[in-house]
Amino acid sequence: PVSTPYAIMSAAAARRRKQLMAKQLSQESSEDIAAESVSSDPIIARLNALLKESAAKRTDPNSPSEDAEAISYEAVQLAQSQVRKCVKAGDGKMSFDIVSDVIIQLLHNTYIGMASQLANQMVDALTETQTEASQEILSKVEMIDAVYKAALDEKNSKNDVLEEEMDRLQRVHVTWLFKMIKYSSDFGTVRLGDKALHLMTAHASWDLGDREVSILHYALAEDPINIVERLMSLPPNPTDAPHFPAAARDALLTRAVLSFLALENLRDANILVKAFIEKDTTRDAKQLATVYLDKEKKQATHVTFCCAMLRICETEATALYQWLLRSFAKELNLYPDLQPYTTKIGRIYFGIEPPPSMMSMMENMMAMMGGGAGGAGGFSPAMFPPGFS
């Protein structure tokens, strides 16, 4: 059958499949820790021996779990000494080659805390030595991310970890991903960080319940389809619910559209809104636009706001943009952190210079990512993105 951008496996199923594949690949590639050029190093050989001994004791029912953990901790200390040695020599790539495989082995044994500690030292070493964020490094980081999630799943399935500890381990991982994004932005080829890293961060943040953070990183990953799938997993407004405020699903749609527009990505903003409306079969988008303009029974919905925002940005209608923000101010005021986005959009598409007080907010927003006059009084259904009928 012919596939479309929307005829894809669920994001959850795709991520799980990717984790399993990464775990299998990492098991195959981590049998020897160092690259061939350092395989004869006696310290590396000792590191390999410690990890193998720890893995054997962990699966031995007659061996206390503390023994395997102590041996793994000795391996971590040895790996840390190698990181310091490589940093002193200015060889960040060598430290990465050694430590990344140790991290993966620790995760296979579900020593997540030790792996996290070593992973943070790994990215610090890469940053300190100003090592290029090569595709080889970024691909290995993607593998670590998948194995980390698999280790969390394994640990969680045994019910031997408190919910608070699982939450902490997940947040530690997201914090590490933030550091990796900054590293890839500083020493890679993408100004705001590698897209694959943003996608990993988006998935992890959503799983933690940090939906606003997740939406931003999906936008930075240029992935509107994953956003739609995530939004559709949330409940819509009940038909008998008060119109204001809107359900989280609609509010996050607006956040995503504003994120794409602030990143000057009209293409994915249009894909997002079109896909959202196609999947939202409970409402008629054209009817929502009509009600938005009704002076007596006006209902300012997020869907209509987003459609109008896209068309206005495409036509560079400054007065309409200013009117649209005023007409939707009640909802936007619920999310003051979106003001730098609308300010940046006004500057990019309409040449509206922000007041000096807003400049620092816009700069902070961009850092986090990496990280008229007149008054036309409305808009018409023709302002919907192309393709709506």
Image: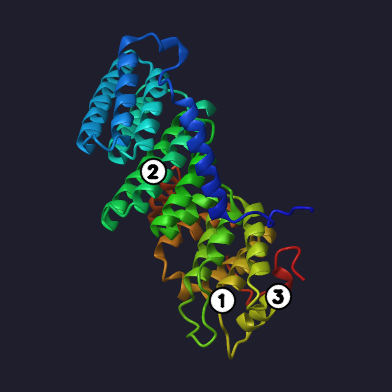
Label for residue 380? 3
What residue appears at the point 67 percent right and 63 percent down from the top-left corner? 274
Quadrant for the C terminus in the image: bottom right
The relative height of residue 257 versus residue 220 in the rendered view (above or below) is below
Q: Is residue 160 left or right of residue 342?
A: left
The residue at the far right in this view is: 1
Viewer-side residue, 312 vs 158: 158
Coordinates of residue 277 in the picture (x, y in percent): 65, 69
- Mark 1 residue type: Thr
Q: Residues within 10 Å of mark 2 (few under 14, many from 20)?
A: many
- Mark 2 residue type: Ala
Point out the tag, 3 or 2, that comes first from the N-terminus.
Answer: 2
Judging by the rendered image, the residue that carries numbered circle 2 is 151
Point out the tag, 1 or 2, that comes first from the N-terminus.
Answer: 2
* Number of disc labels: 3
The residue at the far front in this view is: 62
Q: CA distance from mark 1 to mark 2?
A: 42 Å
Q: Residues within 10 Å of mark 3 (few under 14, many from 20)?
A: few
What residue appears at the point 46 percent right and 54 percent down from the top-left corner? 214
Secondary structure at badge 2 equals: helix
Q: CA distance from mark 3 to mark 2?
A: 52 Å
Judging by the rendered image, the residue that carries numbered circle 1 is 301
Mark 1 or 3: the one toward you = 1
Regarding residue 220, the answer to whether it shows in the image is: no
Point out the tag, 1 or 3, that comes first from the N-terminus.
Answer: 1
